[in-house]
Image (cartoon, rainbow, N blue to C red):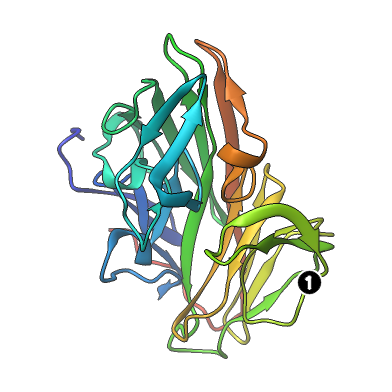
Amino acid sequence: MTSTDPAIHLTNDQATATVHLDGGRLASLAVGGLELLVTDGPKPTRWGSFPMIPWCGRLPFGKLAFDGNNYDFPITSGDHANHGRTHLQSWSVESASDTELAIRTELSEHWPFGGHVVQTYTLTDNSLTVLADVHAADRAMPAMIGWHPWFRRDLGTGGEAELSFTAESIYVLDDNDIPTGELAPVPEGPWDNCFVGLDGDPVISWPGAIDLTVSSTFDHWVIYTQPEHALCVEPQTGPPNQFHLDPHLLSPGEALSGSMTLHWTTSGNISPTPKR
């Protein structure tokens, strides 16, 4: 295994997870031979499950005021800088086995504060966990962590995906779809909103095929159900625009850590995945 491998496969008798070093993303998750993720898209933010670091969601107009200085970041979606930088960067392998992979990238390109990120993917017979550690270098900096998985609505067998969750409230959006910090009751979907106060982990069910629970150490969830072909359940450390609302600050040398776990159960007619 070398750091130049374009794709790395974690495998066991139940599932195969494929991680791309280009973007540090989970590019595929096949359980019992069924692909759960959207595996391609017109842009890097439209497929797989990618890390949102060092910020999540829209950074309004690509601007950040921090510690007495103003910073501008590349505009990547509409008028805004979307989903951080690490999904656009190359990652290198720190360690690898059949069922565990640790990868690293430096926070350097278009991020003035330095630092680095390590993601660790761990595959078991019924789950995949990804852990992220964001390390500040010799400067204080704001930081966020999140993941943006694109789940298929149709697996080719069983029923179409059904999402179940209950939340207390959502963040109110301004005219640019940026959270204002105000909370409101949950409206009817479809949604592209950040939710808080969930009373349990979100569950995606493909009736007759697979039930998937998405759990996390984080307590903010962006739920995106507007696309016809997919739905997104995105755990993150805070709401989009957190840098301007209530930023989490790392001191020099400090780290921010957290994880997301995808845990599945299958119906009796789903076969184990053959190892690659």
Visible residue check, residue 152: yes
Q: Above or below — where is 65 with respect to 195? A: above
Visible residue check, residue 99: no
Q: Position of residue 179 (x, y in %)?
A: 63, 56
Identify residue for label 1.
Answer: 186
Q: Nearer the viewer, residue 216 or 239?
A: 239
Residue type indicated by callout 1: Val
Q: Position of residue 208 (x, y in %)?
A: 61, 87
Q: Which quadrant, please, contains the N terminus?
A: top left
Q: Which quadrant, please, contains the C terminus?
A: bottom left
Q: At 36% across and 20% down in the image, what residue appears? A: 114
Q: At 60% across and 80% down in the image, what residue appears? A: 268
Q: Secondary structure at mark 1?
A: loop
Q: Above or below — where is 111 with respect to 11? A: above
**210 with respect to 93 (left or right):** right
**166 with respect to 224 (left or right):** right
Q: Position of residue 252 (x, y in %)?
A: 51, 10
Q: At 50% across and 82% down in the image, what residue appears? A: 153
Q: Above or below — where is 209 with respect to 57? A: below
Q: Nearer the viewer, residue 189 or 60?
A: 60
Q: Position of residue 178 (x, y in %)?
A: 57, 58
Using the rendered view, name the quadrant where residue 18 is placed: bottom left
* Residue found farthest to the left: 4
**172 with respect to 51 (left or right):** right
Q: At 63% across and 49% down in the image, what residue appears? A: 239
